[in-house]
Image: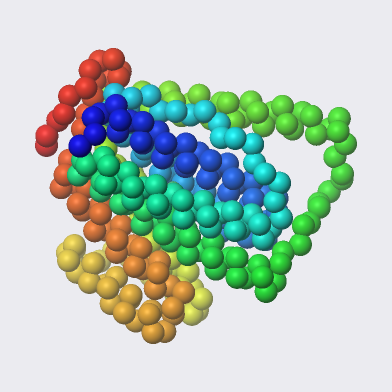
Amino acid sequence: MVDRLTSVDLLNQDLRGEHQAIVHYLTHAWTVIRSFGGAVEAIARDEMRHFKWLSHAIVALGGMPDLSPPDPLPLLSGAEALDYDISAEEEAIRQYRDHQKTIDDHRLQVLLERIVVDEEDHRRQFMILREQWQQWPGQAVVEGPQLTQESVHPFQAALKEEYEGILTALLQSFFARPHYDIGLRAEDRAIDLMKHLGWLGEALGAQGIPVTWSLPETHNGHESRGWLQEILNWSEEHMPHLAPLVARAIQHQRLDAQMARLGGWTVGPYPEGGYREWMS
Ligand SMILES: [Fe+2]
Ligand SMILES: [Fe+2]
């Protein structure tokens, strides 16, 4: 088992990977693969949540999240960008699996497993986008007036300030709470459920069936897991593009429940306030 500081180093390596993925995916979504912008921005939002979970875990271990910006991006065509993003996901999966074995702490292992569930689905989604690009490459669209070197400058300067502001505010947010947990908070679980709702709602909408906005008459956790399993079995045959998303939702439920059972680590208001393990 590696010590706490080695775990912090490994998690920081993962954090830098997430940071790089966010920056690359957003850049690709805004430039060379704009026709897939929405889908790729949704993947970047998942990476932002991974970034937050890893930062909280690092702070909970008494460490400092490494928020240094990633190296400059290579200039790529649309097809190259998608190839690059597929390899980024593959590398992330390999690294998380490796760290899961090395870190040897069950709570962190479950957190990394929760992240890997998303990365595997990202790889799948990027591979589909890559295939679609092959058949129907998007066009680079230039809208509005051409920017001159002079008019571009304020944009670039303002973007730098926005980026710096984001990193500063995030770092403050990681240290602003009285204690930190490893794992997902109730708010994170709500966001997961909103995503699941979206996947199911879109699938229904595509069939012309609106979502019924009402609550179940009885609540039973086993029952709701059963519904997803039923939808998975059905979609495998009738709506294959939905099946991997439902499988991902089932994995989310399983790992969220596991994390809730494991409880968390907490530290004092500041990292120098000391590290103590809190068994709940
Ligand atoms: Fe990620
Ligand atoms: Fe990913």
- Whole-percent x, y for residue 267 in the image: 23, 24
Q: Is residue 218 left or right of residue 232?
A: left
Q: Above or below — where is 215 with respect to 41?
A: below
Can residue 115 be seen in the rendering of this structure? Answer: no
Which quadrant of the view contains residue 263?
Answer: top left
User: Where, quadrant-wise, is the N terminus in this rendering?
Assistant: top left
- Whole-percent x, y for residue 209 in the image: 45, 77
Which quadrant of the view contains residue 262?
Answer: top left
Name the residue: 29% across, 26% down.
5
Q: Is residue 43 left or right of residue 251?
A: right
What colour-coding does the image apply? rainbow
Q: Above or below — where is 164 with respect to 240?
A: above
Name the residue: 23% across, 17% down.
274
Q: Residue furthest bottom?
A: 237
Name the residue: 34% across, 81% down.
234
User: Where, quadrant-wise, is the C terminus in this rendering?
Assistant: top left
Name the residue: 50% across, 39% down.
19
- Whole-percent x, y for residue 225 in the image: 23, 67
